[in-house]
């Protein structure tokens, strides 16, 4: 049982995923810092005359007090958009481009199945009889 567990843990996918999670967390911390220390002060400097986005909107309904930390939410939203843009432009698009280049060189594979002329079920090309309706069909060979 321990050998199976070790085999599972040392498989490439598990190790790659673990590395991706650690790198992603570190990248998230860097982006959070950039947004909090650089982007947010730029936005507040131009839009609100230097006020900070760390405000809290509070209102009362009967005896309950509701508080919304809209500044913190805005920082988190900007961080998410920055991370999503970086992942899209630096990971997704290059991988899609590489995949389209790799697929361009492949020849399309000829299908190994066809439809039965009687019941329209999918059957193998070499079949002499349909497995679904038992109709006789002419085998297709290349």
Image (tube, rainbow, N blue to C red):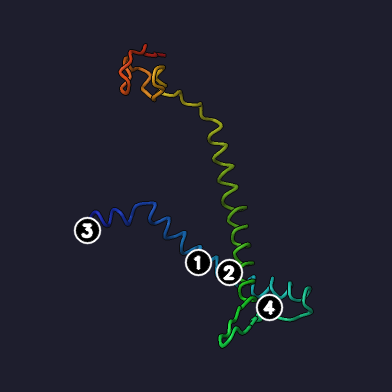
| Location of mark 1 (residue) | 25
Mark 2 or 4 closer to N-term?
A: 2
> How many numbered circles are shown?
4
Residue 17 image point, x, y percent = 42, 57
Of callouts 1 and 2, the N-terminal one: 1
Q: Which residue, given by chain and number where applicable, does mark 2 sit on?
A: 30
Q: Residue at x 46, y 26 (%)?
A: 109
As measured in the structure, the alpha-carbon distance from the residue carrying label 3 to the one carrying label 4 is: 52 Å
Q: Residues within 10 Å of mark 1 (few under 14, many from 20)?
A: few
Q: Position of residue 121 (x, y in %)?
A: 39, 24
Q: Position of residue 95 (x, y in %)?
A: 55, 46
Instruction: Classify mark 2: helix, strand or loop.
Output: helix
- What kind of element bears circle 4? loop
Extreme-left residue of the structure: 1
Q: CA distance from mark 2 to mark 3?
A: 38 Å
| 86 is higher (above) or lower (below) than 50 | above
Residue that numbered label 3 is attached to:
2
């Amino acid at each position: 049982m321990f050998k199976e567990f070790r085999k599972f843990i040392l498989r490439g996918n598990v190790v790659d995923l673990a590395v991706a999670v650690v790198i992603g967390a570190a990248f998230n911390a860097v982006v959070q810092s950039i947004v909090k220390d650089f982007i947010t002060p730029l936005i507040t400097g131009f839009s609100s005359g230097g006020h900070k986005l760390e405000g809290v909107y509070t209102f009362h309904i009967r005896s309950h007090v509701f508080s919304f930390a809209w500044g913190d939410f805005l920082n988190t939203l900007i961080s998410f958009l920055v991370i999503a843009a970086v992942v899209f432009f630096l990971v997704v698009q290059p991988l899609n481009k590489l995949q389209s280049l790799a697929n361009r060189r492949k020849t399309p594979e000829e299908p190994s199945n066809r439809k039965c002329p009687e019941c329209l079920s999918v059957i193998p090309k070499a079949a002499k009889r349909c497995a679904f309706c038992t109709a006789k069909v002419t085998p297709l060979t290349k």
